[in-house]
Image: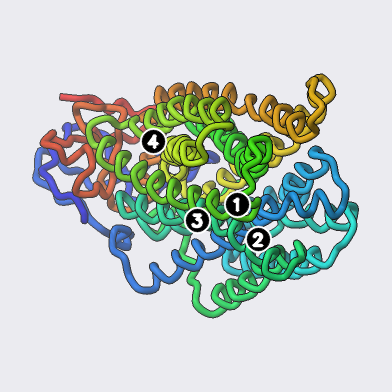
């Protein structure tokens, strides 16, 4: 809804015109409005398209984007579900097995920056459709490879699919919705990340078991991807950038975009913290089932096969993802009303609380299998609190015309230093420490060396939690800058801010926004560049 209130304007002598004077930086604009002193004023909705309203067309577009995310992560995590079969069949080391899981980052590094640049300027539907079509072909072709070298080459091309939509998808959602509706849709998008990971375990191991061939475990997602290409071509809609906020901002040069992103503390700190998230999730997804299976072998427990453990691990991942993403999003929506920096604080506390449960899982891994599953669920639940919140942070601290570039940058570095690195780093540590373990049992040496390799995630998690907490220090001011930049680009709009929080600027305020909590909303109009406007409180 649009927030209506009585606005009391400071009398000033400077007259401001109704058109925005463009500067090189979209955050630096001067605007004018008719001279209005001490009069009641209702916020206009000119230029706004009711971003809180959910229509059939919006929902279909959102679901298609979520479907693309689902099948991408199904493909990513179908390999861990068949990894022991691949290692045994191709006679690979742990390092080589981890490398297969990380190989997608090679093409992602090349394609993602290009997609981010194009996604802020050209048809996002065409970019997504073409990228996913190429990805479908190379993924299906890779499933027919029978040597490590050829399989590695095609797994290296697997990043094309994610690069084609991962930066564009959340930006489109941001252009369709605002406020809590945006938060809910982002929660749905990031929920499919966890669902896709869990289904990847299940479909990969299930197809391999049904066909007695690990190659078939890689052939489900290319078929589904072709379906997504058709949906993008004939059903999906590409909204104008900044539609939900009524933005009239225009794109600038790529160099200015990058400088803008690097100078945004909230984006930088949340990105560094997100590296820790993806590092942890990537390591657990790649080696978790294998680690639990080796522990069962040491105990001579033959009641569970690797496929059984992968299936349960997939269910635990889905369940913890469902509850984690939803509960994190709800906590953010409720708490940010009173605590504007709550999103980053929730993420930080979740990361720090997750580490003890992962530690307990590693230490008690030779105990009850049910205890292991419970500990895995709790550890993943805490870390999954942040998925939707991190996406929301990016959308509200970055202006609409730079969101695709920002998302591409964030996901790129998270993959390079996070889930693309952690599987082979853990495998490398495991291989390096294995000769130092004194035991006649090969299984025990494999188990202990992998355990030592997985201990690295504990330190990474805690470090990531502190970066999220540091992000909370800048969140309010960075959000105000982005909101102000959008607001001054909208013709005949009033910029609102809460007099109790002068750094928080609001426009098109949702019903449960902090600005509606009983405070008088006031504005000082000025012809100065907006970054220099002194928004006083009275």
The label nearer to you, 1 versus 4, is: 1
Q: Is label 4 in contact with label 3 (beta carbons under 8 Å)?
A: no
Q: Which residue is mark 3?
A: 195
Q: Is label 1 in contact with label 2 (beta carbons under 8 Å)?
A: yes
- Which is more N-terminal, label 4 or label 1? 1
Q: Which residue is mark 1?
A: 310
Image quadrant where residue 457 sits: top right
Q: How far apart, in angstroms, are the residues tagged by discs 1 and 4?
A: 41 Å
Query: Under tag 4, what secondary structure?
Result: helix
Q: Nearer the viewer, residue 140 or 242?
A: 140
Query: Under tag 3, what secondary structure?
Result: helix
Q: Is residue 55 left or right of residue 110?
A: left
Q: How far apart, in angstroms, are the residues tagged by discs 3 and 1?
A: 14 Å
The label nearer to you, 4 versus 2, is: 2
- Which is more N-terminal, label 2 or label 1? 2
- Which is more N-terminal, label 2 or label 4? 2
Q: Which residue is mark 2?
A: 204
> In the image, residue 408 lies at what x, y percent?
61, 47
Q: Which residue is mark 4?
A: 479
> In the image, residue 439 lies at what x, y percent?
79, 24
């Amino acid at each position: 809804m649009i927030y209506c209130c009585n606005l009391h304007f400071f009398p000033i002598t400077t007259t401001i015109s109704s058109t925005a004077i463009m500067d090189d930086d979209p955050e630096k604009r001067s605007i004018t409005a008719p001279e209005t002193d001490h009069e009641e004023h209702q916020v206009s909705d000119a230029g706004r398209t009711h971003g809180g309203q959910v229509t059939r067309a919006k929902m279909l577009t959102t679901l298609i984007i979520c479907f693309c995310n689902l099948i991408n992560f199904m493909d990513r995590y179908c390999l861990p579900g068949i990894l022991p079969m691949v290692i045994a069949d191709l006679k690979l080391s742990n390092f080589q097995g981890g490398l297969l899981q990380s190989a997608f980052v090679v093409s992602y590094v090349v394609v993602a920056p290009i997609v981010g640049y194009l996604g802020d300027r050209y048809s996002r539907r065409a970019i997504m459709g073409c990228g996913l079509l190429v990805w479908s072909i190379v993924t299906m072709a890779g499933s027919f490879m029978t040597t490590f070298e050829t399989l590695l080459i095609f797994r290296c091309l697997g990043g094309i699919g994610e690069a084609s939509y991962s930066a564009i998808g959340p930006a489109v959602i941001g252009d369709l919705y605002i406020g809590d509706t945006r938060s809910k849709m982002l929660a749905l998008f990031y929920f499919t990340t966890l669902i896709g990971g869990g289904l990847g375990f299940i479909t990969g191991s299930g197809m391999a078991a049904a066909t007695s061939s690990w190659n078939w475990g890689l052939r489900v997602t290319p078929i589904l991807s072709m379906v997504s290409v058709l949906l993008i071509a004939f059903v999906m809609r590409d909204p104008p950038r900044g539609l939900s906020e009524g933005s009239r901002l225009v794109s600038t040069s790529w160099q200015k975009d990058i400088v803008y992103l690097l100078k945004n503390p909230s984006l930088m700190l949340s990105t560094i913290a997100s590296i820790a998230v993806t590092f942890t999730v990537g390591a657990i997804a790649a080696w978790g089932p294998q680690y639990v299976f080796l522990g069962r072998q040491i105990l001579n427990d033959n009641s569970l096969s690797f496929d059984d453990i992968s299936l349960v691990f997939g269910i635990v991942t889905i369940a913890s993802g469902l509850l984690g993403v939803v509960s994190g999003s709800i906590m953010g929506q409720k708490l940010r009303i009173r605590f504007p920096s709550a999103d980053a604080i929730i993420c930080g506390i979740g990361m720090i609380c997750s580490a003890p449960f992962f530690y307990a899982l590693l230490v008690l891994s030779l105990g009850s299998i049910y205890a292991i599953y419970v500990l895995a669920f709790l550890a993943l639940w805490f870390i999954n609190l942040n998925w939707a919140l991190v996406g929301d942070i990016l959308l509200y601290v970055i202006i609409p015309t730079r969101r695709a570039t920002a998302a591409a940058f964030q996901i790129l570095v998270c993959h390079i230093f996070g889930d693309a690195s952690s599987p082979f780093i853990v495998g490398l540590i495991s291989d390096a420490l294995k000769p130092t373990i004194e035991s006649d049992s090969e299984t025990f040496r494999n188990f202990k060396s992998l355990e030592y390799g997985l201990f690295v995630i504990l330190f990474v998690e805690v470090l990531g939690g502190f970066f999220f907490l540091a992000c909370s220090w800048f969140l309010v001011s960075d959000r105000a800058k982005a909101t102000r930049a959008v607001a001054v680009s909208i013709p005949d709009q009033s910029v609102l801010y809460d007099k109790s929080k002068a750094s928080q600027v609001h426009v098109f305020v949702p019903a449960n926004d902090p600005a509606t909590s009983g405070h008088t909303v006031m504005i000082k109009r000025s012809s100065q560049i907006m970054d220099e406007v002194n928004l006083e409180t009275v």
